[in-house]
Image: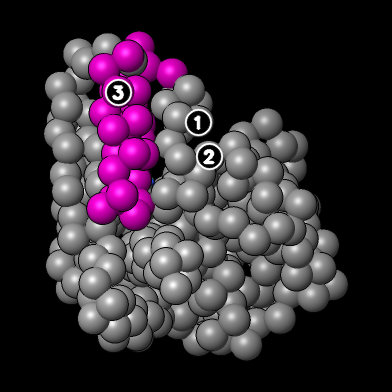
Amino acid sequence: MILIDGKLLASEIKEKLKVEVSELKQKNIHPKLAVILVGDDFASKKYVNNKKIACEYVGIEQELIELGSDIIEEELIKVIEKLNNDESVHGILVQLPLPKHIDSYKIISIINPNKDVDGFHPENVGKLSIGCEGLISCTPNGIMRLLEKYNIDVWGKNCVVIGKSNIVGKPITMLLLKENATVTVCHIETRDISSITRQADVIIVAAGKLGLITSDMIKPGVVIIDVGINRNEDNEICGDVDFDGCKNKASYLTPVPGGVGPMTIAMLMENCVKVAKNISLYHE
Ligand code: GUN
């Protein structure tokens, strides 16, 4: 089995971006990402901090806007509108999940789609689904880059996606279809998942369920991309795949941590630089 090293590819990408950012700065363009964090969810704070570290490394300026969990929707909308109109801000990211009283769809729809570095705005989601250029959500984009790096061709292959979230399951399905894969999407209501996963050449699992994929569910030589982030009984971070059980049967496998996670952040950095570069073209 070949271990897919997301940490390594992510650092290669960040290294390249670092050079591009310094070139942009010479043209007096200073890429800037605004991050909005509502409330004090522990995991969200950690994710936001990881994004901050990556920004510092690449040279992207970061503005963190922390808002109380009791903020009303209108106030949050005003904050986003201000960032939409701020020419010094290239990327806007609203960390999810938002408190229950706020309509996430409405909030994401307010973000200027050209600054939507998460690729969650309906315009960008729509562009992705018809194969048009737009900002692509970071985790699925990172998965495609990993497959490309390891020369894993999905053309005509049986790809099984587990999970139908807007953040991973649906967009990765669109990207795989764009590459002419045959895609089956399984989810919580799917009956007899094993009968489907056993046919898979590639499995992308984003279910958030510890140990969901076991060795009896896969065929020899399968490629497995594990998007899950869970904690086991020893409080260690683990994916959705029974790693030890599957490692001798799969041909390629992503570790958790060190697989998809670092790629998500690298793709976010890439999207920020892409927006800043587009602005630089506009000024030329
Ligand atoms: N919450 C979990 N994943 C993500 C992500 O990729 N972007 C944002 N904004 N929030 C998240």
Does the magenta-highlighted stretch encompass residue 78?
yes
Residue 276 in picture, x, y percent from top left: 37, 64
Q: CA distance from mark 1 to mark 3?
A: 13 Å
Whichever of callouts 2 and 1 sits on the residue coming sooner in the sequence is 1
Residue 172 in picture, x, y percent from top left: 62, 56
Query: Which residue position holds label 1?
Result: 109
Left/right placement of residue 147 relative to residue 256 reads: right
Q: Residue at x 27, y 12 (%)?
A: 72
Task: State whether residue 75 appears in this view.
Answer: yes
Q: State the residue in front, 67 or 175.
A: 67
CB-based contact (under 8 Å), mark 1 and mark 3: no
Ligand 1 - quadrant of the structure image: top left
Say which quadrant the C terminus sits in: bottom left
Residue 123 in picture, x, y percent from top left: 61, 41
Residue at disc 1, secondary structure: helix
Q: Residue at x 15, y 22 (%)?
A: 68
Q: Identity of the amino acid at label 1?
A: Ser
Compared with 183, 108 (above or below) is above
* Front: mark 1 or 3: 3
Circle 1 Cα neighbour tier, 10 Å, few/some/many (<14 / 14–19 / ≥20): some
CB-based contact (under 8 Å), mark 2 and mark 1: yes
Q: CA distance from mark 2 to mark 3?
A: 17 Å
Query: Which residue position holds label 3?
Result: 78
Q: State the residue in front, 7 or 110.
A: 110
Left/right placement of residue 63 relative to residue 170 reads: left
Whichever of callouts 1 and 3 sits on the residue coming sooner in the sequence is 3
Whichever of callouts 2 and 3 sits on the residue coming sooner in the sequence is 3
Magenta residues, as a range? 74-103
Residue 231 in picture, x, y percent from top left: 29, 48
Q: State the residue in front, 134 or 245.
A: 134
